[in-house]
Amino acid sequence: MAEIWELSVEEVARRVRSGDLSAAEVTEAALARTARVEPLIAAYLEIYADAARLRAAEIDRRLAAGEDPGLLAGVPVALKDNLSLAGSPLTCASKILSGYVAPYTATAVERVLDAGAVILGRANMDEFAMGSSCEGSAYQVTRNPWDLGMVPGGSSGGPAAAVAAGSVPLAFGSDTGGSIRQPAALCGVVGIKPTWGRVSRYGLVAFASSTDQVGPLARSVRDAALALSVIAGPDANDATCSERPAEDYLARVEEGIGGLRVGFIREIDVAGFDAASARDWRAAIDHLARAGAEIVEVSVPSLEAAIAVYYVIATCEASANLARFDGVRYGRRAAADNLADLYVDSRSEGFGAEVKRRIMLGTFALSSGYYEAYYGRARSVLGRMRRELDTAFVQADVVVTPTAPGAAFGIGEKVDDPLAMYLSDIFTTPASLVGLPAVAVPTGADDRGLPLSLQIMGRPFAEATVLRAAWALERVVAWRCAPSFRGARGAEAG
Amino acid sequence: MALTPEEVRKIASLARLRFTPEQESVFVHQLGRIVDYIDQLQSFAGEESGADAAAPVREAADVARPCLPRDLFLANAPAAARGEFLVVPEVKGGGEDG
């Protein structure tokens, strides 16, 4: 029989709602599992053990009184440290926000709480969500549960590692250029980046506002679909959030993909892949074909410019968004005897290297004399990418790519080479730039046992279609998220 | 294009950042490589696009709504006075353009 910490989100909620299991039992199981794996992976910046127990007791009281706590009743959840929870610290894994306490709760988090979830803690990330390895955190390096010498991916590395290691069955992160999908891929879990505007960004600390989205990470497509149903939908506090009502993404997820047109991008060159990734990529397409999909070839020549476009547009937006961190209204303040030095010293002491690099790049690209050559040019190539993807989605219902160019890389391997790190995002940035929904689904492992993943992109607001394809693939692959904690001293934690 | 140390200092000043000489030389090298990479955009044919995003942005209703209470806002401030004001050091002087 499965341990409580191994249960799916659906199973936990079902059993808690039926009275078969108490929220307190689920919370204790999650805390015990977390106590076992956290020393190995360092996924959390803070674990809310006491608050989680109080919250579980409240859920159990409500159940005893005949109330239904909701779709996530008693489900332990981890939050990336850029999602606001009123009264709790929020640092974005940055020194500049040390001491900051969120004065209000993000809409997505409010909905998760309204559905009866128990927040277990805030999870580590690359500082201000800028990074692909979680090594950019100002506080700690999170390790990949499959191999402790490897990165968990980023920037939502803490949430992905926590879910993969069995600490929680569900976590929420943010994705600006791949920050949910790439760590989901590297940790062997499912991650959804919704359509831009599908989920409210209210209470999410902004990085690049034109692509930021909140989304779930879970161990199965069904669990991720359920979680998305909870957080999606209009929000009066976010004018960029669509007025389209939320959907029940679970309702039709198992309908199958007979006749669904799956596009693979002609320009993806497997010659640049390692042997296992190339094999896995071909196998994933074969699996979809065997599940009934019609495989069609589509062309997106601008894919090769995606990283360049993304690192101009996202850094320009970041340089503007992060101007607010100046030591005056919140966060860390440097000792200075005049205002100009206060700004410069607070920012120079408070931000880490990658954040400074991106602010510098964005400031450069927006500066007089360079604006048209960089920002203007990037917008124009983005226009072309949008048109090419529009055409691809006439020929295909979903478009697939590998989620990442390979499996998890070693801790420290790319940390001194920012450009090599940026190239990890080659396949995830187009859906971000164009605002499309995309899901990362585990497809197998490489020769070292490290997870590999397929990205399935859809038309705007076609999350249901994307998830249907993801479920069909998951069923054929029969992936089991059971990491081995390779490199742990003594017996494995699994 | 390569960036010169002077250009990096100019960008840092615009970004309200300051670097030690060692950090500056690292940035000159790293930013130069990144800018070289994004320069590929110059040879890539672009085009104007229509809608800006998947979801059209609507304007918020022009209606007054409650905002963050002052005490909650000031609770995060590094320095505040009388429960009403943010406190900052002298505004004059300092900085390169101060």
Image (cartoon, grey):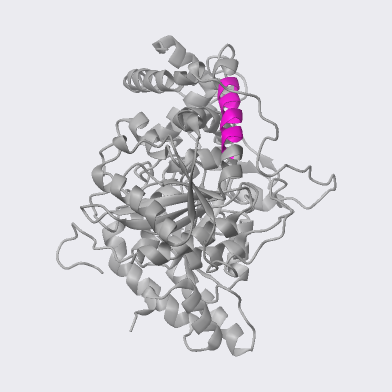
Q: Residue at x 59, y 85 (%)?
A: A63
Label total for image: 0
Residue range corresponding to the magenta coloring: A376-389
**In the picture, which quadrant includes the C terminus of chain A?**
bottom left
> Which quadrant is home to the N terminus of chain A?
bottom left
Between A10 and A416, the residue placed more toward the observer is A10
**Residue A272: where, in percent of width, then height?**
30, 35
Question: At 33% across and 32% down in the image, what residue appears?
Answer: A420
Q: Is residue A272 left or right of residue A291?
A: left
- Report the front residue among A14 and A488: A14
Seen in the picture, residue A250 relative to A60 is either above or below; the reply is above
x and y, in percent, of residue A487 in the image: 18, 57
Q: Position of residue A366 (x, y in %)?
A: 57, 21
Residue A490 occupies quadrant: bottom left
A85 shown above or below A382: below
Which quadrant of the view contains residue A31? Answer: bottom left
Residue A159: tell me if it is visible: no
Which residue lies at the image location 62% right of the left edge and 64% below the top edge? Answer: A111
Residue A374 seen anywhere in this rendered image of the structure: yes
Q: Is A387 one of the magenta-colored residues?
A: yes
The reply to whether the magenta stretch includes residue A58 is no
Q: Nearer the viewer, residue B17 or A299?
A: A299
Side of A254 where A489 appears, left or right:
left
